[in-house]
Image (cartoon, helix red, strand yellow):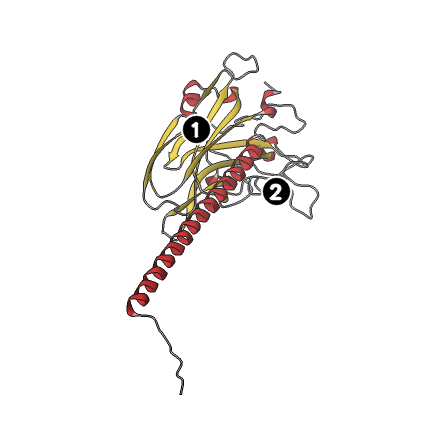
Amino acid sequence: MKYNKYQGFTLVELLLAMALGLFLLAGVSTVYVSSKKTYNIRDQTSELDENARLALRTLKQHIEHAGYASTTGILVPNFILPTGHTVIAATCADGSSNVRNAGIISASADNASVWGDTIGLTYMADAELDSDCSGSRLVQPPATTSACLPPDAVVRESRYIYNSFSVGSTRTNAMGDAIPELRCGGSRTIMTQPWAEGIENIQFQYGVDNNADGAVDNYWNATAVQGAGVWDDILAVRVGLLVRTVDPVFDRAVAENFQVLDQVINTSDRYRRSVYTTTIRLKNVARRI
């Protein structure tokens, strides 16, 4: 009778195979973890850029409205709200107010909080432009006219719309860290509204025309403008943003410093950051000075 001869693996061969398998598994795991980390950094960085673009677009749109006077041809007073300025509501023809909550409208100030500067703006509403930074309007559909606008407006001040921008936080991420965000306070709403998250610090400088030639001569911060008393001579606003990822992306804390206009900001944590700047010309003001 014939028997088939079977051969198995020896213990040494099994141990070698297991060791090789573990080695390959460790390599695959390393590649997976590294790829996941790279993807996370890329995803967070892309979100950071998008948040910065949204913030700059929002600021440009509303800062450009400063000093808008419709067809009146006048220079709107306090088109940039001076440091310490308090907004005063005006009464419309129906007894309502053009400002719903003056307490959420900040004046322009340097480093008003750990989040940086604030800026306040004024413009005159009409049927074509009557929304604050939150999108709330003086003319509320389905109405086609408003007691705050001509021909019903009792006083010109009832047409003023005020906006302010600052950085704050109302939420935290999975790590329990505050998520900073650009926020706006508008005269037609009762609470500040978030616009873009990840905006960690905001700085403003004001382009001042010192010799009335219609051109910017110096960019000063709010403290310098206040000291010189030249808020009415501002022709442009320079904006600097320090933007960070919403969640940490680095394995360990990284010490860095960032120049945001006239401020140096030091950080040491696991977040990625970038600085963005733009200059906004106040066309409505320039053509009336």
Where in the figure is residue 112, as x and y percent of width and height?
39, 34
Q: Residue at x 31, y 63 (%)?
A: 16
In the picture as drawn, the residue positioned furthest to the left comes out as 12
Up/down of 156 relative to 200, above or below: above
Query: Closer to the N terminus: mark 2 or mark 1?
Result: 1
- Residue pointed to by mark 1: 83
Examine the image and state in which quarter residue 23 appears: bottom left
Where in the figure is residue 124, as x and y percent of width and height?
61, 32
**Residue nearer the viewer, 89 or 209:** 209
Where in the figure is residue 263, as x and y percent of width and height?
38, 28
Tell me the kind of residue under disc 2.
Arg
Where in the figure is residue 17, as x and y percent of width and height?
34, 64
In the picture as drawn, the residue positioned furthest to the bottom comes out as 1
Quadrant of the drawing holding the N terminus? bottom left
Locate residue 276 relative to residue 127 in the image: left or right.
left
Examine the image and state in which quarter residue 152 appears: top right
- Determine crowd level at label 1: few under 14, some 14-19, many 20+ residues with C-alpha closer than 10 A: many
Up/down of 78 relative to 1, above or below: above
Query: Which of the labelled discs sits on residue 6, or is there none?
Result: none
- Residue pointed to by mark 2: 137
Marks 2 and 1, how far apart in space?
26 Å
Up/down of 78 relative to 37, above or below: above
What element does badge 1 sit on? Answer: loop
Locate residue 25 relative to residue 90 in the image: left or right.
left
- Determine crowd level at label 2: few under 14, some 14-19, many 20+ residues with C-alpha closer than 10 A: some
Tell me the kind of residue under disc 1.
Thr
Q: Residue at x 61, y 42 (%)?
A: 137
